[in-house]
Image (spheres, helix red, strand yellow):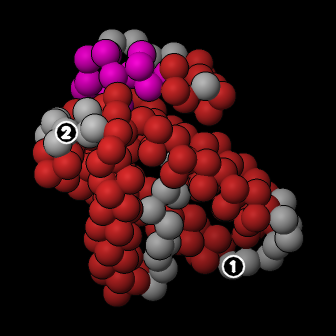
Amino acid sequence: MQMDIVSRAQNIARSPQSEWRVIADEPAAITELYTGYVAILAAIPLVAELLHLLFSGAPVGVAIAIPFTGYVMSLINVAVVAVIASKLASRFGGVDDLAQGFKLAAYASTAAWLGGVFLLLPWVGWLLRLVCSLYSIYVFYIGIPELTRVPSERRVGYFVCVLVATMIVSWVIAMILVMLTGQARLMPFR
């Protein structure tokens, strides 16, 4: 499966409802999704934050460690969200399908990763990035029926459970990263 990363990112950001239908029917290769989409788009905030820190005079070690830790956390969070989303789906009347969970977690994070470019802007960059991250959460929500098959009447409960469980697990992972590196990111859709 050859994926056009630019078209996919544009489509999921601009018209997620129709793009989720296309994504749901595609064969899923988790490794290809990670290497051909997640690893690339998750690098946008990494590069932007690295440049911002370097230009603002942060020591090189700090300028590398902070964004790199955030990047690692982004990659981990995709897996965490995917596993939680797929495992909880059957409890809410949906289908436990890890590949679909990975597609949901990876593609829903697109706006947050693209919004990482705003980290280059002083003062308002974090606010614009937050808006993009909130949009990613919305995109995740509207992708639930197509990818997990959770019925619409149970979607809100499922969504809240996935969000809370992801935040708890991500917090634990972030604390482990703090112990290992001294740096961590706590955003589930980084």
> In terms of depth relative to the viewer, which is nearer, 4 or 49?
4
- Dot 1 or dot 2: first in sequence order is 1
Q: Amino acid at mark 1?
A: Pro
Residue at image point 59% right, 18% down: 7
Q: Which mark is residue 94?
A: 2
Is residue 52 rendered to the left or right of residue 136?
right
Element type at mark 2: loop
Q: Categorize mark 2 by other alpha carbons within 10 Å: few (<14), some (14-19), many (20+).
A: many
Percent of width and height locating residue 49: 67, 61
Q: Disc 1 to disc 2, how far (Cα)?
A: 49 Å
Residue 142 vertical placement versus 55 (above, below): above
> In terms of depth relative to the viewer, which is nearer, 39 or 168?
168
**Of the two numbered discs 1 and 2 in the rendering, the one whose residue sits closer to the viewer:** 2
Prevalent SS, magenta region: helix
Residue occupied by mark 1: 59
Q: Is residue 96 visible?
A: yes
Residue at image point 44% right, 56% down: 74
Residue at image point 29% right, 48% down: 154
Element type at mark 1: loop
Percent of width and height locating residue 163: 38, 62
Q: Categorize mark 1 by other alpha carbons within 10 Å: few (<14), some (14-19), many (20+).
A: few
Is residue 130 rendered to the left or right of residue 97?
right
Percent of width and height locating residue 172: 30, 78
Q: Which residues are magenta?
A: 19-34
The verdict on residue 69 being magenta is no
